[in-house]
Image (tube, helix red, strand yellow):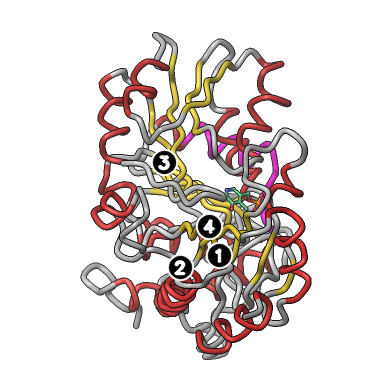
Amino acid sequence: MPVDLSRVKIETLAVHAGWESDPHTGAVISPLTLSTTFERGADQLPGKHIYIRSGNPNRLALEETLALLEGGAAALAFSSGQAATMALLQALGPGDHVIAPEDAYYGTPALLRDLFARWGLTYTLVDMRDLAHVQSALRPNTRLVWIETPSNPMLRVVDIAAIAGIAHEAHALVACDNTWATPILQRPFELGADIVMHSTTKYLSGHSDVQGGALIFREPGELADRVGVIQSTGGAVPAPFDCYLVHRGIRTLPWRMRAHCENARRVAEHLAGHAGVAAVHYPGLSSHTGHAVAARQMRDFGGMLSFEVRGGRAEALALCARTQLFAHATSLGGPESLIEHRASVEGPTTKTPEGLLRVSVGLEHADDLIADFDAALGG
Ligand SMILES: *Cc1c(COP(=O)(O)O)cnc(C)c1O
């Protein structure tokens, strides 16, 4: 019998949403359905599915699960986080204006600058920690305000509810990139967002082995329908196996996030007391400028942090080469800890301090992670 998920806690939801025993075999885990095409009934009418791109069982199960997890009305899965962001921007029109954070994930402004400027979409990048900057960036044609918090790589925190209030007063939509916080730690719809975006490549799938993205809509309606057409007609959709992997990863998301948060807190506190470290950026530290807002709008402070070593670029690069448990690689959200020199990745125009290292704290034991840093930092 299907489980009634209407009143359960998020841990239970994550385990059960979208999964049902296969009526043909009794298999407890729903099967992976690779078929590209689906039979019509004798009456020639299509059944639940017609063709793989417009919909298939594994994608539908994932989309229903994503909508339930975020508390939205509908979800659409994409082949990457970037494809999800792109689909939302494609639903806007030429001449529309977008406001986004100046420290958004680099791919978001890259889409606005390199692809959508040619389509007549205009945009303004602002520091959203200061609400006056959001207010003064608004124009009569502002259709979308894009929020990302905590941000990359300085872990800046912005007030979702306050920004949503300002945007809605100007009749603009509010989208929140919730990739870093996940629906376990941050509930953008409850804070006023209209759309939630995820790179499911990160925590939602959680094992660094699949690429995907998603948009979740607070309400059904014209916008969700339009983006649905972009998804199925444009075709930037995930394969059934990719959907299966993301859906499987979600089952352990709430418990993985607890461990990521616990480990990150311990690593952050340890680094903050280390003589070789000049600064630690983690919203869970009371010294962090965004701590109060994060404490109000997040259930916990996440698994991402960054820190600045004494000795600048040379020492930062040397440190990434010396850590053993922290793999020197980009991305985040997997079981293994990762460390990355962001200024090198971002190139010559970067504003990121040269001594800064970004860390995705994984699911190893915190004692081992701390010992790895102590050995790498020396002394
Ligand atoms: C990775 C990431 C993206 C882009 O997602 P892809 O799956 O790599 O396309 C967008 N936003 C944030 C915050 C990310 O970390």
* Residue 286 location (% of width, % of height): 31, 60
**Quadrant where the C terminus is found in the figure:** bottom right
Name the secondary structure under disc 2.
helix
The three-letter amino acid code for the residue at tag 4 is Lys
Residue under the image location 65 percent in, 44 percent down: 82
Residue 30 visible (yes or no)? yes
Corner quadrant of residue 184 = bottom left
User: Along the polypeptide, which appears first: circle 1 or circle 3?
Assistant: 3
Q: Are marks 2 and 3 in contact (CB under 8 Å)?
A: no
Between the residue at mark 2 and the residue at mark 3, the CA separation in whole angstroms equals 35 Å
The type of residue carrying mark 2 is Ala
Instruction: State the residue in front, 233 or 159.
Output: 159
Q: Which residue is mark 2?
A: 272
Q: Earlier in the sequence, mark 2 or mark 4?
A: 4
Residue bearing mark 1:
277
Give SS at disc 3. strand
**Whether label 2 touches label 1, CB < 8 Å:** yes
Q: Say if disc 2 is inside 8 Å of ligand 1.
A: no
- Contact, CB < 8 Å: mark 1 with mark 4? no
Task: Please rate how many residues cluster around mark 2, counting C-alpha atoms within 10 Å: few if below 14, some from 14 to 19, many from 20.
Answer: some
Q: Earlier in the sequence, mark 2 or mark 3?
A: 3
Q: CA distance from mark 2 to mark 4?
A: 55 Å
